[in-house]
Amino acid sequence: MMENEKTIQSVTDIERTTIRRVTLRLMPFLMVCYFFALLDRVNVGFAALLMNKDIGLSPTVFGFGASLFFVSYFLVEVPSNLALEKFGARRWISRIMITWGFISASMALVVGPNSFYVMRFVLGAAEAGFFPGVVLFLTYWLPSIYRARFIAIFMVSIPVASFLGSPLSAMLLGMDGLLGLKGWQWLFICEGVPAALLGVACLFILTDRPADAKWLSDEQRSWLIERIESDGSRKRAIGHLSIWQLLRNKHFLVMAMVCAGASATGTALAVWQPQILRSFGLTIMQTGFLNSVPYGIASVLMILWGRHSDRTNERRWHTALTLLLISAGLGSMALASGMLAPTVMLLSFTLIGAYSFKGPFWALTSGWMSPKTAAAGLAGINAISNLVGGGAISLVGMIKESTGSFAVALLPLVLLTAIGGVSVLLMTREKVASTNTK
């Protein structure tokens, strides 16, 4: 491991101005795009408060249908990221957003279990590739020393989507009966259309590579290209591998499993947490506002955690500790049974861990992979973790229906995240950790 003082770099004026301009150009827009990606993915959790009764979905049927999103997401994720590398981020991210926005709005047309299954499966295929595509895109623009904080800033859209989306979704459900449509139909329409419009905006705002950035000065462009190329020349734990070689690489497989724990937790709670809170007898509006509390707290702390990881250039413990916090939070849910305030507190601890995990983890992972492997590697890890997340949604639904307890239904995630935290510490304790921090 490098000593902390070696991580403190002198920042030149050209570096400072270049990073600032890149940040202001790309990050706000990408955050808004990801906000709607997450909103369109998890709004089904709020729609379920009314939709399930209207179209006859049991907890098991709803959980299975919601999880189908992640099956198609898994199947299309790697091909989508390879296509992004071939066709360019600007056009491919635009294609993804226009497609998923249209399909998300079309969720208003579901009339029963079968149509719900079909639409969730198609929606997953449409959105596949957006997140790993953006992470790959950011490696084209951000030197490695900046990645944890900016990935955390980008990914703050996840808890923000639930923080703002919860009361927004609750209000949209209140439009029930307007123009003959149900409230849950208005929810899908009003949250799907903006994604398609943002997809069109991608064509005008995004730039594929620094060499094409006319909005940078010649000096800034040259500095950034040289710095990114310097990062790319470092020795990596995972060199240039094919997709099939990746699937046999122990570092890749362990990181996919590690990511699966945090991803499954965030995904499962995004879908089931409104129903967990509603079980305390809250109104829909009360559920919406209270559901946003853990996400608001997580939004702030994940940025601070990512910034601290960059400042110390430490990824190992910053990743592992978040997983152990998730495990402790979920594992204590049974102790808060029947008590609203402790339940909200434990959900907050859990989501702080699930989202603070993301900045250090993706910085660690992208640092392990050679540039030629990153497209498939990042997409593969994200695809596997999302497939596990989809399975978690279905599993929680089945266990809840059979036991009547959300605390019991969440126990598999306790085990998965605990194993993930220990695995990070074991995998990175020797040469891999030192390779990443040099």
Image (spheres, rainbow, N blue to C red):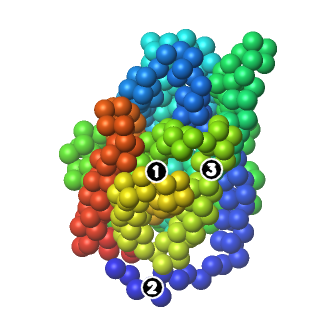
* Residue at x 20%, y 45% (from the top left corner): 248
Residue type (three-letter) at the residue carrying disc 1:
Gly
Which residue type carries mark 2? Asn
For the residues labelled 2 and 3, the Cα–Cα distance comes to 40 Å
Gap between marks 1 and 3 measured at Cα: 16 Å
In the displayed structure, 307 sits above or below 83; it is below
Q: Quadrant of the N terminus?
A: bottom left
Toward the viewer: 105 or 31? Answer: 105
Question: Which marked residue is nearer to the observer: mark 1 or mark 3?
Answer: 1
Q: Which of the two discs, 2 and 3, sits closer to the camera?
A: 3
Using residue 180 as the reference point, say whether residue 86 is left or right of it: left
Q: Residue 272 location in percent, x, y? A: 48, 39
Amino acid beneath label 3:
Leu
Residue 290's disc is 3
Examine the image and state in which quarter residue 435 appears: bottom left
Residue 278 x/y as whole percent: 55, 40
Q: What mark, if any, has residue 338 been given in the picture?
A: 1
Crowd rating for badge 2 (residues with CA inside 10 Å; few <14, some 14–19, many 20+): few
Residue under the image location 73 percent in, 57 percent down: 24
Q: Earlier in the sequence, mark 1 or mark 2?
A: 2
Label 2: which secondary element:
helix
Q: Which mark is residue 293?
A: none
Taking the spot 72% from the left edge, 43% from the top edge, the residue there is 205
Q: Secondary structure at mark 3?
A: helix
Q: Is residue 340 visible?
A: yes
Mark 1 or 3, nearer chain start: 3
First in sequence: mark 2 vs mark 3? 2
Q: Is residue 219 above or below residue 3?
A: above
Give residue 75's position: percent from left, percent from top.
37, 29
Q: Which residue is mark 2?
A: 4
The residue nearer to you, when weighing 95 against 396, is 396
**Which residue reaches farthest bottom?**
5
